[in-house]
Image (spheres, grey):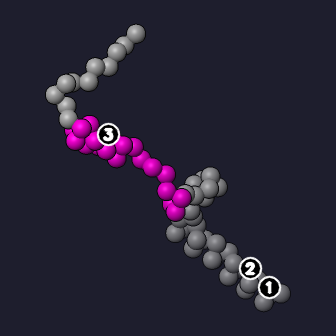
């Protein structure tokens, strides 16, 4: 069994500072920046894919006009 002994030279201010220091290193979750799993997994199309989609859309519109 491990025992933790407090150094008799520590002060209350040191204990407060140490506890604050340790707790500040723990990341806290912020509800403002949370995203759903779907948003995290969402694939953002590249510029080339966007241009390709625009080209296909315009091509189909022109094909309909020709018919």
Quadrant of residue 45 in the image? bottom right
Q: Is residue 54 visible?
A: yes
| Residue in the image at 39% along x and 43% along y | 26
| Residue in the image at 83% along x and 87% along y | 67
Task: Please tell me which residue lies in front, 23 or 38.
Answer: 23
Q: Is residue 46 magenta?
A: no
| Residue in the image at 16% along x and 28% along y | 9
Position of residue 20 measured from the top left corner of the image (x, y, whole percent):
31, 44
Q: Are marks 3 and 2 in contact (CB under 8 Å)?
A: no
| Residue in the image at 22% along x and 41% along y | 13
Q: Identify the residue position indicated by label 3 in the image.
A: 19
Q: Identify the residue position indicated by label 1 in the image.
A: 64
Task: Please tell me which residue lies in front, 25 or 3.
Answer: 3
> Residue reaching furthest left?
9
Position of residue 2 measured from the top left corner of the image (x, y, whole percent):
37, 13
Q: Secondary structure at mark 3?
A: helix
Range of residues picked out in magenta: 12-33
Q: Identify the residue position indicated by label 2 in the image.
A: 60
Q: Work out which quarter of the rendered image holds the N terminus and state it.
A: top left
Q: Is residue 26 left or right of residue 5?
A: right
């Amino acid at each position: 069994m491990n025992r933790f002994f407090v150094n008799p030279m520590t002060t209350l201010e040191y204990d407060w500072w140490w506890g604050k220091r340790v707790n500040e290193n723990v990341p806290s979750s912020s509800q403002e920046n949370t995203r759903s799993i779907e948003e995290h997994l969402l694939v953002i199309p590249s510029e080339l894919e966007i241009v390709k989609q625009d080209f296909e859309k315009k091509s189909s519109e022109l094909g309909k006009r020709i018919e």
